[in-house]
Amino acid sequence: MIPRYSSPKIEKIWSLENKFSIWTKIECLVAEKLAANGIIPKKAAKDICNNAKFNVKEIELIEKETKHDVIAYINNVSSHIGKNSKYFHHGITSSDIIDTSFSIQLKQSSEIIINKLSNFLKILRNKAIQHKHTVMIGRSHGIHAEPITFGIKLASFYCEFKRSLERLKLAKKEISICSISGPVGTFNSIDPSIEKFVADKMGLYVEKVSTQVIPRDRHAVFFTSLGILASSIERLAIEIRHLQRTEISEVEEFFEKGQKGSSAMPHKRNPILSENLTGLSRYIRSAVIPSMENIALWHERDMSHSSVERILGPDITIATDFALSRISMVIKKLIIYPENMKKNLESLGGLHKSQNILLALIQRGISRQKAYTLIQFAAKKSLISNKKFEDLLIKNPEIKKYINEKDLEKLFLKNNTIKHIERIFKAAFHN
C-alpha cells in the first residue's frame, strides 16, 4: 500500500520482519514440542530456540537462487543454529508455516480494525444522541418524503456498523486457524499434537480437516466482511456528499485552516474526504471476488491463491484501517446546519404532510383512492404554480365535504416531532 493510505501500526504487521518473526516463533514451537515428544533431541530444540535468527536481506539474496522463499528462510536461519539445524523445519511443509503465519497476520490486522470500528461506533452514537431531535426532511429516491431527525439517520448507520463489528469478530475467529499437518494434510510426517501445541501457544484454533493448505473459504469470509464494511462506509460517505451539495447544505465536512478547495475557484469547499472514502471502498470491495476465486484450488493444494493473497492481505487491511480512521474524523468534525434542515423541510409548503391529510380524510369516510387522487392533484398544482399546498386543499370543495378549514389548519400546524423517537433510539442503543 502506498504511504498516503498507510499507518505504521498495521503496516508493520505486513513487514517481512514481522512475517519472518512469526515463522520463527512457529518453527521454535514445533521444535519444542518435537523434543517433548522425543522425536528430536532436547539439545536440538534448545539450540533452535536460542539461535534461530534471520536476516531479511540475506533471505532475499538466497531466494534469487532457490526461487523458493521458505527454503531461502530455512537456509538463512539454519546458518545461525549450527549442527542441530538438521532438525529445523522437521516433518513439516512450507504451507504449514506460510498459512499459519498468514492467519496470525490477518488476526493481528483484524484486531486493529475491530478496535478502530468500536471507537467509530462511539463517535456515531454520540453524534446521533446529540442530534436526536434535529428535525430534517427524509428523502426517498432523492425526493422529499416525510420528516425524520438527523439523529435517527445516524442511528441507522450505527446499527449497520454494529452489524459489521459482529461480522468482523466472527471473521476473525474464522481465520484464526493453525494448520500444521504436513504434506497433503495427513500428519504422515508430523504428529497432530504438534499442531494443537502451536495453536494453543499462538492463540489459534486447529483446522479440523485441512488439505495441504487452510481451506480458503475462511479467508473469503474475512475479505467479504471487509467488503461489506467498506460498502457501509461508502453509504455514509455518499450521504454526506449529498447533504453537502450547495442546494441542500445541511451538513459539511470540516474545512481546515489553510485548506483549499479548488485551484481555479477560491469559493469551493468540496467533500473531498467523503469522495476519497467512496474510492477506497471500491478498492476494498475489489478483494471479495478474488478471495472467493481462491477457494477453488486443485486437489490438496496449488499456488494460484498465493500471489493474490500477498497483495490482498496487506493492501486491503491497510486500506480498511485508513478508511475507518478517515470516516471517524469526518463524523467527529462534521458541521451540522439545523437551520438549513428546517428551511429545506419547509421549502415545499407542507407537502410532507400529504400522508397525514390522506389518513385524516380516510378516517372521515372518503375512499382511499379518491382521497389520494385529490391530494395528489393539489400537490402537483402546488409544485407547478408555486401556490401553497394548504390553500389549494382548503379551497377544494370535495375535500371541504369531509374536513373543515380549522381541522385542516391544525394538521398543518402540527409540529414535526417524531412520535416514536424514544422507541427508535432504545432499539438502536440499548439492545
Image (tube, rainbow, N blue to C red):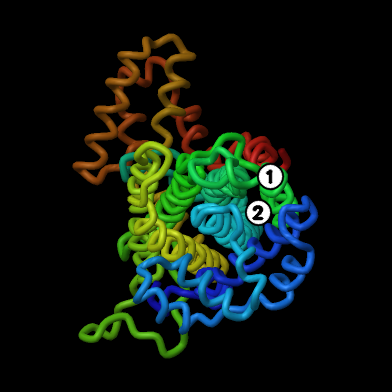
Between residue 74 and residue 244, name the one nearer to us.
74
**Mark 2 secondary-structure assignment:** helix
Q: Amino acid at mark 1?
A: Phe
Residue 277 seen in the current view: yes
In this image, 360 relative to 127: left or right? left
Between residue 124 and residue 204, name the one nearer to us.
204
Between residue 75 and residue 160, name the one nearer to us.
75
Mark 2 packing: few (<14 Cα in 10 Å), some, or many (20+)? some
Residue for badge 2: 129
Residue 241 % position (x, y): 36, 61
**Mark 1 secondary-structure assignment:** helix
Between residue 159 and residue 83, name the one nearer to us.
83
Earlier along the polypeptide chain: callout 2 or callout 1? 2
Residue for badge 1: 429
Residue 10 % position (x, y): 55, 70
Residue 212 % position (x, y): 48, 44
Q: Quadrant of the C terminus?
A: top right
Nearer to us: label 2 or label 1? 1
Mark 1 packing: few (<14 Cα in 10 Å), some, or many (20+)? few
Q: Amino acid at mark 2?
A: Ile
Residue at position x 48%, y 68% from top?
Answer: 322
Query: Is residue 308 depicted above or below 213 in this figure?
Result: below
Residue 55 % position (x, y): 54, 82
Residue at position x 28%, y 27% from top?
Answer: 376
